[in-house]
Image (spheres, grey):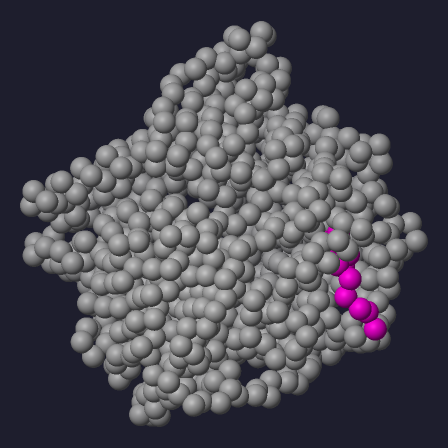
Amino acid sequence: MQQANRFRLVEERHIPEINSLARLFEHQKTGARVLSMTNQDENKVFGITFRTPPRDNTGVAHILEHSVLCGSRRYRVKEPFVELLKSSVQTFLNAITFPDKTCYPVASQNRQDLYNLMDVYLDAVFFPNIPPEVFAQEGWHYELPSQDAPLKFKGVVYNEMKGAYSSPESLLAEYSQQSLYPQGTYGLDSGGIPEEILNLTYDDFIQFHKKFYHPSNAWIFFYGDDPEQERLDRVGEFLDQFDPLDVNSQVNTQPRTDMQKRVEESYSATDESDPRCYLTINWLLPETSYPQLNLGLRILDFILTGMPASPLRRRLIESGLGEDLAGVGLETDIFQMYYSTGMKGVPPENLDRVEALIQETLQDLARNGIDPEIVQAAMSSVEFALRENNTGSFPRGLAVMFRALSTWLYDESPFSLLEFSDVLEQIKLRLEQGEKVFENLIQEHFLDNTHRTVVLLRPDSDMERRIQEMENQRLEEARKQLDQKQMQELVESTQKLMKWQEEPDDPEELARIPRLTRSDMEPQIRTVPRREEKVQEATLLMHPQPTSGIFYLDLGMDLHFLPQKYLSYVPLFGRALLEIGTFSQDYTALTTRIRQLTGGIVPVPFSHSVRGSSESTCRLFLRGKSLPEKVPDMFKIFRDILTQVKLDNKERFRQMVLEEKSGLEQALVPAGHRVVGMRLKARYSEADWAQEHMSGVTYLLFLRHLLEKIEKNWDQVLSDLEGIKSLLVHKGSMLVNITAEEDALDQGRQYLQDFLQEIPREEASRQHWKWSCTPGNEALYIPARVNYVGRAVDLESGSYRFHGSSMAATRFLRASWLWDKIRVQGGAYGAFSSYDHFNNVMAFTSYRDPNITKTLQAFAGSGAYLSRPDLDPEEVEKAVIGAVGEMDSYQLPDAKGFSSMIRFLANITDEYRQNIRDEILGASVENFREFGQALDQALREDKGVISILGGQSQIEEHQEELELENSFRLL
């Protein structure tokens, strides 16, 4: 096809809200849709999406998402995705299965790197190499290594979803959504229900790809500062190879009916657990494509539950009927929106009262009106967030892509939710004219809406055993149906799969995968300008950055002024400063004021090792941001919360403790690898020990004890909080970090002078913490069907001296040996390794892992793998590229200022960083082997420490070989 006729321009417009020129194209031959956004953002994004509504719960869309990245027509290796992870400077590289679509997005600051990623992804999705071995590995298969071995189910997605279905919060979200759509697409789980994944056949898997993975069913997206014509030329080369196809991928919608129903399900709990239940009320809402309704509901969601002062949140929390809010809130990423809210940690006798309270609160708000101050706070917060467009480490372009898809995928304009300014002004005008905008939304979409469900989730202490028994029975029945010949065929297919997994890729095929080289890497580090000075007794750091006028303020108080017995109080103290009220304002008025006048203030407990010191830098940060004209107001808020906080609100403090506890318990299953990693590293450094006391298992156990202490000895708790305030809130404890436009920095410095005048001066002494932990292997029991396995060792025993090349070696280990042994061959969802060069400690963890001892054996073999004589120099080259990319991770202006401050606190100079970069860029096979030999010696001579989070029955099978010295139940 001629270039001029390849694409038809459908629409063009400038979108000031995201500073982009947007052009919508249609591929003339196939009808593929292409949205091209051109702007000055160097973090470029490409994504291709297919509409993939499931027809059952076998997880075929999810398994296919994993599988197409396991080799393709042009790149005939087993896992091009992993090769890209090794050798790209990507800022995002993944694939995502949604309830009705599958997305393949990538991002990079390097233009050639982006096009390399795009080329591999397009070849993968359109021309995948997906033989039965890939389906078996990523989906599911029977594993039978020998005729006398136990028959098992195995597969990456199968184990991933076993992990997902071990989390009560995940179950609650899934059941809540499905309850509303009994006749629609969203009544199914596109990720797959573990037991139903086992019903998926290879033929169904192949047919799903043929049906949906075609340009005629594709939505293609570009964003960033690369030239548009090159984008179109590159994607056009793939699209031109197809003829048009009539693809029926319509989402089955759910008719609105009078279907008020109650759904009761169970979640797995331990015998000793409290009988705590979950409850949500759920409403089906209209389609996403009405901009004013969409934004109005988003603001209403914030009004109801987005702030501590929000009326629905406040009434539920203050009722004492449960521990914390539950439900996803407003869901807008699908065709038909829904709203879900409720409570978790609810005693069974309170369930009806929670349901009634939600209804009563909504009726009261609709009848008597919403506090105008709350409305103003929510409007200000949502507008600030929309205009700031701060997506953190997540590429802005991806956020834009997902927002566009939420209408574009359903044949509506991709721009309707991106152009929010006029819609926001219309809502403001309606409010100014006295219209009850949000009260009317409550009445119409909640109170008068009869398409409504209630979902209850009750604990079941026998559920885990029953599920395991059903799996065992299914395996037993499958084995009984095998005759001797079929048994041998299954053994041979298992061995064939294992052999295929272990076979190295052809070096010539590996060389086809496009990648950057060391010569493409910028030799110099990226620096952030920083000015340092003392203001009164506080330390001030200032970072001039192009922040689009936003003023970012970080105020950090030195936790080393506290005795270590107070450390676990710190996250609660940070919340109390912002959420408990002052002598002049209760917490409702204070939190509303914060939202009206700023972009938000959040507490962040922080710790980091210091180069050249055994002591850490440990601080409680209050991180705020505001528009230029509101900076004086923000400083006044900081002054009030620090000097006028009224800590003697027992009930409000108890509510915060319950929320913290509930949040930590909720994270145990989804983030089990982080829990284990934190436990391991806490044995080796003060910084990690402190962090574990403020966010890990130790903190969770502290919160449980604190709840009892509040009831029995509140005076002592209050005394502790007042003591913390007196020890932390003084000038000598404070570090102030400002990131703003150049012309705002001097003005900010003057506001700081005035602020510090009202902060007390104390002659407090910094404390020395005796933080050492008793080593010992441990098991932490939770009701889960998968495990999170960890091990850490100290490389001091191998006398290893840090060299920057170890950062590349660790990445290589993660993407090769650990990936192959633990994910590919072991069936776990993932495995990680991290080397702390400040403390010379190597830590390994696995994620959603069906194994324990096999994983520990893989960890133990890591050093030998790195130090083997046949290590390929090309693999070293790839790891170097990836390590440099990690060093140059993309950051928005506020993150640059915060990172620069961390380097200041941790004594990480630009000279030190440059030396590390030089050593990474100069890394050799010999460097990798040297690190591998030290690691191997440490793993053989030093048992280190093992920490495992998982189901008790699975762990106890390996009790003796694990040499557990400590074990206890977490849930």
Magenta residues span: 799-814
Residue 192 place in picture, x, y as percent:
52, 45
Q: Is residue 265 above or below residue 256?
A: below
Residue 709, given in percent of the width and then of the height, sits at 37, 88
Q: Position of residue 951 (x, y in %)?
A: 59, 68
Please name the residue shown 20% across and 39% down the image. Answer: 425
Is residue 36 rendered to the left or right of residue 907?
left
Q: Residue at x 68, y 49 (%)?
A: 524
Quadrant position of the N terminus in the picture: top right
- Rendered image quadrant of residue 894: bottom left
Q: Residue furthest right?
A: 869
In-image side of 755 versus 119 (left or right):
left
**Along the viewing direction, whichever of 769 and 246 lies nearer the viewer:** 769
Residue 812 within the segment the image draws in magenta: yes
Is residue 847 covered in magenta? Answer: no
- Magenta stretch, overall SS: helix
The image shows residue 434, relative to residue 555, as above or below, that is: above
The answer to whether residue 548 of the structure is visible from this angle is yes
Q: Left or right of 389: which side holds 146?
A: right
Identify the residue at image location x=16%, y=58%. 373
> Residue visible at 82% across and 38% down?
505
